[in-house]
Each structure stands twice: as structure tokens, then as C-alpha cells.
Image (spheres, rainbow, N blue to C red):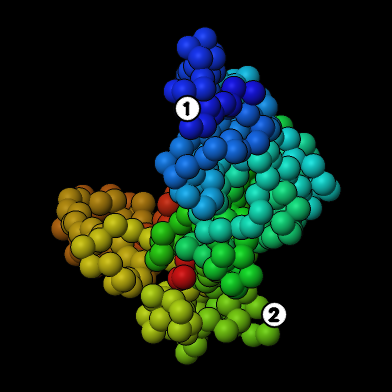
């Protein structure tokens, strides 16, 4: 301890040698910040005192005439200083308690939870779901994370063994019950990071659970008809679903019916049911059916009638035989020589009822909230 106060000096009773000793002791007290495990007995407003009761963690305090106010903390073993009121709460202490019921015991301890209180910790195990944190025995409060602008419960794996985490106390979180907000969860929900109105293809046939969840603060719509009933993915978020036509010219659309969605009242194409491709355009939302670019042409010349059969229809227009001199396959005749065309008879043809490029199919989802 380097605390000393010589009191009132009486020049008629204090010798020079004694005065020198007192002044030297007082100098040491001033130079050391009145360092000690208890507050100086001679404290006055404006005095600074280094509290080393939690050595090697020192707390620099200022006396306001009534109370000692924490100014900042010093970790003398690590040669580091911490912001006001932080102290060991920012030294990444290892947490105690259970896997989903964490405890933290910083020195000096907290006596209450206040808004914007910051704490840090190093985890010893992976959490398995919703979790709590109790600092200095003040009381267990939920650990929450931010998602789409709202605080939500932790999920399994948000806290991993051996990782370091920051938490900030928010008295308004957890529906006003107060909670520690985990700033850097290990798992970031990718579905919470997607923009609104962007169709996203998902190979949700691979394993169960690949589709965006429906129980979060965000919400997606599956762009598929017939999913609005009880238990359906789109239950409660679409109205006016309409399906018409037959394959390949199916038309399917519905109206977003979710008051909290910025897209509420907007019509969306159910492209999974339609089997419709999405293409770049200057008129987004315009719907087109398949078509082929028109190809025209003509044929002329002299043909040996024996090489062709007089068959009806096709893409070619019949032409009149030019003359008998070139009709060497039989008696001289005039008339029409017919041509038919069927692309399905081409070598290696892949013909069907629609025109499409090589593709792989996926289920499209779109965020609406």
C-alpha cells in the first residue's frame, strides 16, 4: 500500500526530519495514485485512487465527494487498459456453468445490468440451443442474437468451444425482459442475409431441411402452387392463387398476403408450377410463353419426282413440276411435288412439346419479409 496523508502540519511541533519523512511518504502516495486495496481514508472530491483489490486487475477510480466512480481498468499482468467499467469483462475469461446456462465472474463484479454493458468470454463447449448468461450472480438473462432487425434466441452452434465472443446488454431485448446480445455468433443464418424479391433456386430434394425456415422473423414464399393449405409452406402468406392452361403453357400466380411484408399485395409468378425460366429484361415482371424465331425460305429447281412422295402438310410449300424433259422416272406428267418436314426425324433429335435449353431443375423460393 502506498497511501499516506500527513494531516495538518503544525510548524511548532513537527521537526524538519519528521516533516521530510511525511512529505516523502505523501509523495509516494501521490506518485502511485494512492494505490491500495481499500479507498484512502483522506479522500476528497477529485482524488484518483488505484484499487488493486483484484490484483493483477487494477481499477482507476475518481471520488466525486460521495462515491468512487470507475474510470478505467488496467490488467497489470497483460499490460493492457480497458474502457470505463469494463475491466475483466473484456479480457475473454473462460465461462463456467452449463452448456446452455453460462456464468461469468469478472473482477470487479457487476452489481446490476445496465444498457450497453459489454462483456466478453471464451466458450468451453458448443451450445445446443437457446442459452442464458449470468454475470457476477446478478441473474441469468437470455443470450440472443440479431436477425433481420430483431433479437432472436440462439441456435445450436452459435457458440463454439474455444471461440471468443462479445455480448452487449440490452434491457429492451427479449420482449422487455432484458438480454445479452451476442454480437458475433459463429453461425450466421444465410437466409437472413438475402434481399427481398430475389428468386433463389434450391436443390431441396437432396435432404430435408434445405428450404428457408418459416418460423423466423423473415419469411420466404415457395414459388409453387398448391402450398397455401394448412401445413403448407405458403400457408397464410398468399391469396388469390390461380392456375390455368396445360403443360407446357401453364400459367400460375398469386398475391402476397402478409401485412408485415413490404411486398404485401404484389402478384408473384409461381414459376415452379409454370416451369418458367427467368430472363433479363427492361420490363421486369412481364410474362411470355415459349416461341421460336421465325425462319423462312424457298426451294426451286428441277426434281426427280421418283425421289419424293406426294405427302400432305409440312413447312415447305408445294411447287409445280417444271417440265417433262427432266421427269425421267416415268411418263411425262405435270403436277405438285410435296415435301414434309419433321425435326423429330433428324439424327439424334430430342423432340418434345416445348422448346428449352439444357437445364437442371430446382425449387425457387423468394424472400417477401
Is residue 161 visible in the rendered structure shown here? no
Compare marks 1 and 2 and give the one earlier in the sequence: 1
Q: On the image, numbered disc 1 is attached to which residue? A: 10
Rendered position, 277 above or below 15: below
The quadrant in which the N terminus is found is: top right
Residue 18 picture quarter = top right
Q: Nearer the viewer, residue 295 or 240?
A: 240
For this orientation, the residue located farthest to the front is: 12
Q: Nearer the viewer, mark 1 or mark 2?
A: 1
- Provide the secondary structure element on which disc 1 rests: loop
Q: Residues within 10 Å of mark 1 (few under 14, many from 20)?
A: few
Residue visible at 21% across and 63% down in the picture: 282
Q: Residues within 10 Å of mark 2 (few under 14, many from 20)?
A: few
Residue 120 picture quarter = top right
Residue visible at 23% across and 67% down in the picture: 283
Task: Say the numbered circle drawn on residue 323.
Answer: none
Residue visible at 33% across and 58% down in the picture: 279
Residue 272 drawn at (x, y percent) = 52, 68
Q: Is residue 308 left or right of residue 41?
A: left
Task: Say the numbered circle drawn on residue 231.
Answer: 2
Residue 356 drawn at (x, y percent) = 43, 57
For this orientation, the residue located farthest to the bottom is: 240
Give the mark count. 2
Rendered position, 259 above or below 91: below
CA gap between label 1 and label 2 equals: 91 Å
Residue 180 drawn at (x, y percent) = 62, 55
Residue 204 picture quarter = bottom right
- Provide the secondary structure element on which disc 2 rests: loop
Amino acid at each position: 500500500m502506498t497511501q499516506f496523508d500527513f494531516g495538518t502540519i503544525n510548524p511548532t511541533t513537527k521537526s524538519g526530519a519528521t516533516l521530510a519523512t511525511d512529505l516523502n511518504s505523501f509523495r509516494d502516495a501521490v506518485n502511485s495514485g494512492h494505490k491500495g486495496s481499500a479507498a484512502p481514508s483522506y479522500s476528497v472530491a477529485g482524488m484518483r485512487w488505484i484499487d488493486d483489490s483484484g490484483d493483477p486487475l487494477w481499477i482507476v477510480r475518481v471520488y466525486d465527494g460521495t462515491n468512487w466512480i470507475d474510470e478505467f481498468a488496467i490488467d497489470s499482468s497483460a499490460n493492457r487498459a480497458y474502457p470505463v467499467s469494463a475491466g475483466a469483462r473484456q479480457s475473454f475469461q473462460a465461462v463456467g456453468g452449463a452448456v446452455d446456462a453460462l456464468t461469468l465472474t469478472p473482477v470487479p463484479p457487476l452489481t446490476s445490468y445496465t444498457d450497453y454493458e459489454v462483456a466478453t468470454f471464451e466458450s468451453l463447449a458448443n451450445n445446443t440451443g437457446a442459452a442464458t448468461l449470468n454475470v457476477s450472480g446478478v441473474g441469468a438473462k437470455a443470450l440472443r442474437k440479431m436477425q433481420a432487425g430483431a433479437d432472436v434466441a440462439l441456435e445450436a452452434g452459435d457458440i463454439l468451444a474455444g471461440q471468443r465472443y462479445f455480448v452487449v446488454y440490452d434491457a429492451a431485448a427479449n420482449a422487455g425482459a432484458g438480454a445479452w446480445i451476442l454480437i458475433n455468433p459463429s453461425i450466421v443464418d444465410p437466409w437472413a442475409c438475402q434481399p427481398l424479391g430475389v428468386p433463389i433456386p434450391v436443390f431441396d430434394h437432396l435432404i430435408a431441411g434445405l428450404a428457408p425456415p418459416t418460423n423466423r422473423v423473415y419469411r420466404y414464399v415457395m414459388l409453387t402452387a398448391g402450398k397455401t393449405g394448412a401445413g403448407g409452406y405458403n400457408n397464410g402468406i398468399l391469396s388469390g392463387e390461380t392456375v390455368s392452361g396445360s403443360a407446357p403453357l401453364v400459367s400460375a400466380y398469386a398475391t402476397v398476403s402478409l401485412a408485415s411484408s413490404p411486398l404485401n399485395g404484389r402478384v408473384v409468378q409461381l414459376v415452379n408450377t409454370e416451369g418458367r425460366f427467368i430472363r433479363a429484361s427492361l420490363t421486369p415482371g412481364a410474362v411470355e410463353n415459349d416461341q421460336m424465331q421465325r425462319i423462312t425460305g424457298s426451294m426451286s429447281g428441277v426434281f426427280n419426282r421418283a425421289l419424293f412422295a406426294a405427302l400432305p402438310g409440312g413447312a415447305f410449300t408445294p411447287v409445280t413440276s417444271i417440265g417433262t424433259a427432266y421427269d425421267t422416272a416415268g411418263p411425262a406428267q405435270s403436277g405438285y411435288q410435296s415435301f414434309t418436314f419433321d425435326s423429330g426425324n433428324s439424327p439424334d433429335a430430342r423432340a418434345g412439346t416445348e422448346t428449352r435449353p439444357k437445364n437442371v431443375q430446382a425449387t425457387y423460393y423468394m424472400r417477401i419479409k
